[in-house]
């Protein structure tokens, strides 16, 4: 008889539900008649993601004390469970938004890979040692590589997949090298054990920390590790881009916070500076480059780089408020990102080609609902009041001010001012026309049918974007509970 | 509660207008009803308003984001009550103007107008710094679209310039708010105390200097006031600029006593320069709206002069003048709009001779013109006189400059009146262009009527703006109110 370790199935359940979903949709792609694959996959996926989100909430509810799962390989706590809920809900919104996709091939595979990627991320945010962290990272990254290249008939999509694969693998390699160095210096893999281990003043150890940071920087597309972002975001299928921009950021940043404060609290004078530097670089590059963009997906890609900057500021604050600010900021950010890409996807299907600023023209009047929602999304990204984005920025700024870094507040404010230049361009394109020129682009093939599921996703994102402004305290209370499980 | 209601009514009206699929007529009707209900609410509350009381009236305070010490706190003191009233009156007239003109896409338009009114009422009623910032920014959203969609030919450039200027100022203010509020642990104006940090002070000053605008920050003004639809320009110059008055009186003066003292001369010089420069520019403009725009800038300079003089008389005068200038400039912009609808242009060289056969138009332009140049006996004269008398104690030079600017005001106003009403009939003025009659009359007459009342009884405002009729000590005492002994 071999002793099997007792497994905390509940802690694993959000990820397992998604894995099961992935298997079912993959089977469905083979078994279900071709015409019925899409409705089947959508239906099952909605069920799967909702189940995962509910299980995540149950775990959140029942994990007021953090505990280890399978020695130190995984942590069951509120931070991980909360992030899992957010990731599952993002997945749900993406499923709804992509139900109307025009893609004919690989429909089942799309939903299967989506669920697999989400499962990887859910696992990733609860990782408790360097090995599971790397395993989960590869798990969701590989799913995403394939998803990016899923539109095999579009060259841009293949290009995006290839670029993401090469650059992403490079990032993973650096991360793995960093993990190896840290392991070499301390002899420990678990986050908590690394903190207690001796040998922390080893130069190898610090190098390892730096390489881990760089590797995670690739994943959250923080400058200067952002080069892949614009091309990949632009080329990948729009709903995949939305998933990457929203869910990968949640996973990457939550794990970065967990790793840094659990494993490296002693080295905080090193990594706070490094993270702040990444933040400043991301803000500068993201915002400056976004101004020059005409393609909306590319612009949103640079905007997501700049948001990585704001979120990294919250991590750099290295205090409890910063952790809460990070988690709060993610809520409206995720909603606005998913919503904005969903609107772009709707326009893309309507026109049958890439959406540039010019091709957004008049959308606000033709589709008032999508137009107003898009307006709210970009205002939230720009940090305007009446949207959660405003309070998110405010919270981040106050956290870092509390940490004594007033100059980061000033940089953040300047970046926000810069960002208006391109966010307002989108609003302008939606609602305003120069002079009396008629719209240059008309819908291809007449007015497309209303996409009720996509509208539902947009409505949900809209409700969260606005709702997180008015109901800020309940969300912050949850964030406080989540942050309570890590040693901040 | 009542203040909350006054903030909520326009917002709810806006939502209804946006959501209900009504016809053009019903939509503008609904918007007007909301605007008039708001006016009724305000008028109805005047009886119970205790102007002499040291306490906030009709206040509400709720925790909103207690993690950071942010609350939803609104309430009114006398001067706020008058600014809210100004908003409501001008807003109602502007909405009426919009429905008279028959704006395209009525549901979007009237919803945004109501939204703007609600945000402005919120600005003037805020007692929490973050809440103030929220409303201060929220009003940009409708303005951006109102100018950008319904404005003149160069509207896009105008609206982008306006928003970028304003945002640059207000984001600096946001940094200041964060620094000030976080270091004090609260954002509640009554608890936040004072700060002696010059940088924090300058952040606030930047936002309000853009909003007013003061001299080097006025680059947005001409295009915004000219390209905006006339009724939006009326709200911009009449009410939105008064957000700067509120901010300076209620945030900057009480909470930054030392920096105010240090920078007083600088601001006074800037304000005086704005006063004179605006007047000179107004005199050189080739069109009606240009004159009104720069005249508005000049008058704002005078008001800021009064605020930073910070004597009792000057502060009373600043509030009174804010209200009467708001009414006058709103009325002038509406009249300019009416002239433009008749002639198709506001350019002086194409106008002229409109008084002949149009007595009502002529009378209204003349009357409001007289208010603009502050003819003795008018409420504007009372306000300007109080400001100048008050600023005299800070230095006779400022008073002298101010008095000289009143002469300039007479010059540009008379030039406007004669170019539009008198002289030979301009090319653009058709013989049969109608006079102002019927419903149109009711868009401007209320403004004139209120101005007439204020002229007869300026003390209605000047003695009821601050409790105890001692503005300086009341404002100065604010920072201490609510602190534990």
Image (tube, coloured by chain):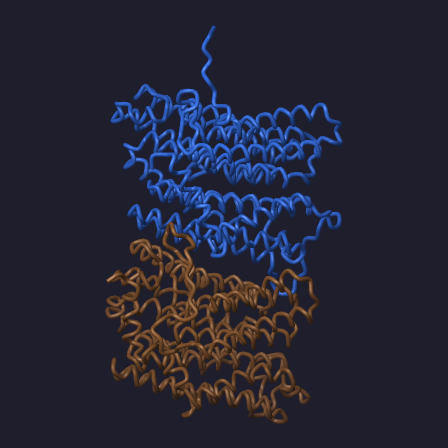
Relative to residue A219, is residue B104 drawn left or right? right
State the image coordinates of residue B232 (x, y, percent, origin top left).
Answer: 54, 72
Q: Which chain is blue?
A: A
The one nearer the camera, A41 or A82, is A82
Residue reaching furthest top?
A: A1
Identify which residue, B279 or A184, lies in the foreground: A184
Q: How many marks?
A: 0
Quarter holding residue A50 = top right
Q: Which residue is located at x 29 percent, y 36 percent?
A: A268
Q: Is residue B358 above or below residue A410?
A: below
Q: Nearer the viewer, residue B298 or A124?
A: A124
Rendering colour (chain B): brown
Q: Is residue B238 visible?
A: no
Q: Quadrant of residue A63?
A: top left
Q: Position of residue B183 (x, y in %)?
A: 29, 54
Q: Where in the figure is residue A65, as x and y percent of width and height?
A: 39, 32
Q: Tell me if I can see residue A127 in this picture.
A: yes
State left or right for residue A134 relative to residue A108: left
User: Where residue A288 appears, x then y in whole percent?
Assistant: 45, 49
Quadrant in which the C terminus of chain B is drawn: bottom left
Residue A113 located left or right of residue A33: left
Left or right position of B380 against A35 = left
């Amino acid at each position: 008889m071999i002793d099997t370790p007792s497994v905390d199935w509940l802690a694993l359940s959000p990820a397992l539900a998604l894995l099961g979903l992935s298997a079912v949709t993959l089977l469905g792609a083979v078994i279900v008649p071709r015409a019925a694959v899409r409705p089947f996959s959508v239906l099952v996926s909605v069920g799967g993601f909702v189940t995962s989100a509910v299980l995540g909430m149950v775990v959140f509810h029942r994990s007021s004390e953090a505990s280890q799962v399978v020695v130190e390989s995984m942590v069951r706590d509120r931070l991980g469970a909360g992030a899992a809920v957010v990731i599952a809900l993002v997945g749900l919104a993406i499923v709804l938004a992509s139900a109307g996709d025009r893609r004919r091939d690989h429909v089942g595979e799309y939903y299967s890979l989506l669920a697999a990627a989400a499962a990887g991320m859910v696992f990733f945010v609860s990782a408790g040692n360097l090995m599971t962290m790397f395993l989960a990272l590869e798990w969701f990254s590989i799913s995403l590589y394939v998803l990016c290249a899923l539109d095999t008939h579009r060259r841009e999509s293949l290009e995006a997949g290839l670029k993401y694969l090469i650059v992403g693998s490079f990032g993973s390699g650096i991360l793995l090298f960093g993990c190896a160095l840290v392991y070499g210096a301390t002899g420990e893999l678990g986050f908590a054990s690394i903190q207690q281990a001796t040998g922390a003043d080893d130069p190898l150890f610090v190098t390892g920390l730096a390489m881990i940071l760089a590797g995670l920087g690739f994943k959250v597309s923080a400058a200067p590790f952002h080069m892949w972002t614009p091309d990949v975001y632009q080329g990948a299928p729009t709903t995949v881009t939305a998933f990457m921009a929203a869910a990968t950021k949640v996973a990457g940043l939550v794990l970065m916070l967990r790793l840094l404060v659990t494993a490296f609290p002693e080295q905080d004078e090193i990594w706070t500076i490094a993270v702040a530097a990444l933040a400043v670089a991301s803000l500068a590059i993201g915002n400056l480059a976004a101004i020059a963009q005409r393609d909306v997906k590319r612009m949103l890609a640079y905007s997501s780089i700049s948001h990585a900057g704001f979120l990294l500021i919250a991590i750099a604050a290295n205090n409890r408020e910063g952790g809460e600010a990070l988690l709060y900021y993610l809520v409206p950010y995720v909603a606005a990102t998913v919503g904005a890409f969903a609107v772009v996807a709707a326009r893309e299907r309507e026109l049958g080609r890439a959406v540039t600023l010019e091709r957004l023209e008049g959308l606000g009047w033709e589709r008032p609902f999508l137009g107003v929602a898009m307006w709210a999304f970009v205002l939230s990204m720009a940090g305007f009041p009446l949207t959660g984005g405003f309070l998110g920025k405010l919270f981040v700024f106050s956290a870092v001010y509390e940490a004594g870094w007033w100059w980061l507040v000033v940089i953040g404010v300047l970046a926000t001012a810069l960002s208006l230049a391109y966010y307002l361009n989108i609003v302008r394109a939606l609602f305003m026309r120069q002079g009396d020129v008629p719209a240059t682009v008309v819908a291809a093939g007449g007015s497309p049918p209303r996409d009720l599921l996509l509208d539902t996703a947009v409505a949900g994102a809209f409700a969260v974007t606005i709702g997180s402004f008015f109901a800020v305290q309940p969300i912050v209370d949850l964030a406080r509970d989540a942050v309570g499980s890590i040693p901040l | 509660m009542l203040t909350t209601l006054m903030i909520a009514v326009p917002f709810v009206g806006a939502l209804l207008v946006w959501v209900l699929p009504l016809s053009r007529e019903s939509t503008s009707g609904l918007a007007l009803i909301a605007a008039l209900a708001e006016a009724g609410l305000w008028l109805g509350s005047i009886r119970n308003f205790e102007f002499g009381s040291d306490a906030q009236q009709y206040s509400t305070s709720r925790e909103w984001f207690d993690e950071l010490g942010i609350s939803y706190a609104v309430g009114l003191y006398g001067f706020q009550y008058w600014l809210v009233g100004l908003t409501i009156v001008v807003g109602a007239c502007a909405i009426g103007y919009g429905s008279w003109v028959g704006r395209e896409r009525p549901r979007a338009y009237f919803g945004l107008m109501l939204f703007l009114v609600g945000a402005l009422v919120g600005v003037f009623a805020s007692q929490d710094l973050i809440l103030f910032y929220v409303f201060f920014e929220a009003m940009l959203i409708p303005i951006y679209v109102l100018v950008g969609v319904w404005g003149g030919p160069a509207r896009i450039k105008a609206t982008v310039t306006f928003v970028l200027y304003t945002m640059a100022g207000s984001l600096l203010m946001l940094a200041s708010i964060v620094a000030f509020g976080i270091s004090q642990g609260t954002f509640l104006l009554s608890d936040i105390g004072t700060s002696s940090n010059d940088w924090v002070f300058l952040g606030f000053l930047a936002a309000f200097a853009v909003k007013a605008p003061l001299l080097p920050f006025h680059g947005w003004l001409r295009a915004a006031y000219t390209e905006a639809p006339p009724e939006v320009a009326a709200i911009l110059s009449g009410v939105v600029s008064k957000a700067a008055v509120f901010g300076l009186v209620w945030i900057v003066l009480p909470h930054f006593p030392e920096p105010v003292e240090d920078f007083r001369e600088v601001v006074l010089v800037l304000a005086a320069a704005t006063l004179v420069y605006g007047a000179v520019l107004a005199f050189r403009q080739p069109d009606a709206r240009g004159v009104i725009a720069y005249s508005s800038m000049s008058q704002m300079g005078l008001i800021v002069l009064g605020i930073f003089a910070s004597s009792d008389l000057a502060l009373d005068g600043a509030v009174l003048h804010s209200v009467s200038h708001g009414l006058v400039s709103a009325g002038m912009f509406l009249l300019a709009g009416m002239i433009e609808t008749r002639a198709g242009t506001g350019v002086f060289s194409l106008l002229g001779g409109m008084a002949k056969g149009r007595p009502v138009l002529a009378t209204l332009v003349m009357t409001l013109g007289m208010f603009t140049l502050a003819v003795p006996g008018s409420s504007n004269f009372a306000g300007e006189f109080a400001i100048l008398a008050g600023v005299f104690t800070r230095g006779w030079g400022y008073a002298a400059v101010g008095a000289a600017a009143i002469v300039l005001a007479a010059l540009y106003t008379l030039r406007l009146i004669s170019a539009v009403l008198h002289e030979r009939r301009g090319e653009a003025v058709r013989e049969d262009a109608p006079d102002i009659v019927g419903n149109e009359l009711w868009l401007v007459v209320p403004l004139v009527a209120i101005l007439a009342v204020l002229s007869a009884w300026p003390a209605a405002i000047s003695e009821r703006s601050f409790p105890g009729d001692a503005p300086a000590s009341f404002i100065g005492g604010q920072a201490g109110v609510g602190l534990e002994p």
